[in-house]
Image (cartoon, rainbow, N blue to C red):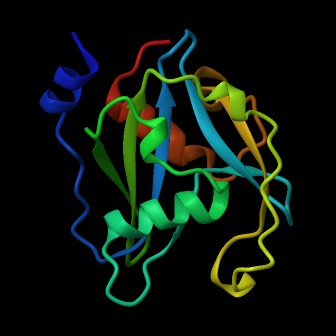
Amino acid sequence: MSIKNYIKNKKSYDCKKKIKNAGILLISYNTLPLKVLLVRDINNKKYMLPVGGIKNNDGPFRTSKREFFEETWLKLEPLLSNKEYIYYDIEHNNSCTRIYIYFTNKDITKYDGDKIKNKDILNKKDFYETDKIKCVELKKLYNNKFNIRYPNTIIKIVDYLNLKF
């Protein structure tokens, strides 16, 4: 089955609570094993998905794209092989975080280890301080063999997607 058909046939998972944060899970199937693009929090040195809070009148979709850029300094569109996505809502006590899931056949490993560009031009209170990009095998994240913040988020999403390694 093609990725486009997979995404078309897979339903997004909706939470019934208010969505306060949004982010992106970018999965590369360019080469096996599947890889995911993460960013490293400068303070606790743990890796995480590019995620952030919804501001003003931004919806979750716009927030996810903004946060991806703010935390990686990469434009999302050139990394995508198609514009299709599904999303998965992570439930918290009284809110949700929406994760948009994109699959790409493009090579994201060329960004592995990249240092995040100087962010002095941005207002630092508006985003997580991230300092490095990492491309990690999905299987390592799933088996919690990597220093990641919120590992259960990845496990829930991978289980929902029913991805095979």
Q: Is residue 95 visible?
A: yes
Rendered position, 103 above or below 101: above
Residue 141 falls in which quadrant of the image? top right
Residue 138 falls in which quadrant of the image? top right
Residue 101, position as x, y percentages in the image: 38, 42
Left/right of residue 60 with respect to residue 37 in the rendered view: left
Left/right of residue 93 with respect to residue 145 in the rendered view: left
Residue depicted at 76% across the width and 34% down the height:
146
Exactly how many numbered labels are in the figure?
Answer: 0
Residue depicted at 43% across the width and 78% down the height:
54
Report the quarter where the N terminus lies.
top left
Rendered position, 108 above or below 115: above
Q: Is residue 22 visible?
A: no
Residue depicted at 54% across the width and 57% down the height:
68
Residue depicted at 47% across the width and 18% down the height:
29
Residue 90, position as x, y percentages in the image: 40, 57
Left/right of residue 82 with respect to residue 103 in the rendered view: left
Left/right of residue 26 with respect to residue 91 in the rendered view: right
Which of the pair 137/151 is nearer the observer? 137
Rendered position, 96 above or below 53: above
Residue 123, position as x, y percentages in the image: 70, 86
List the single residue furthest toward the left.
9
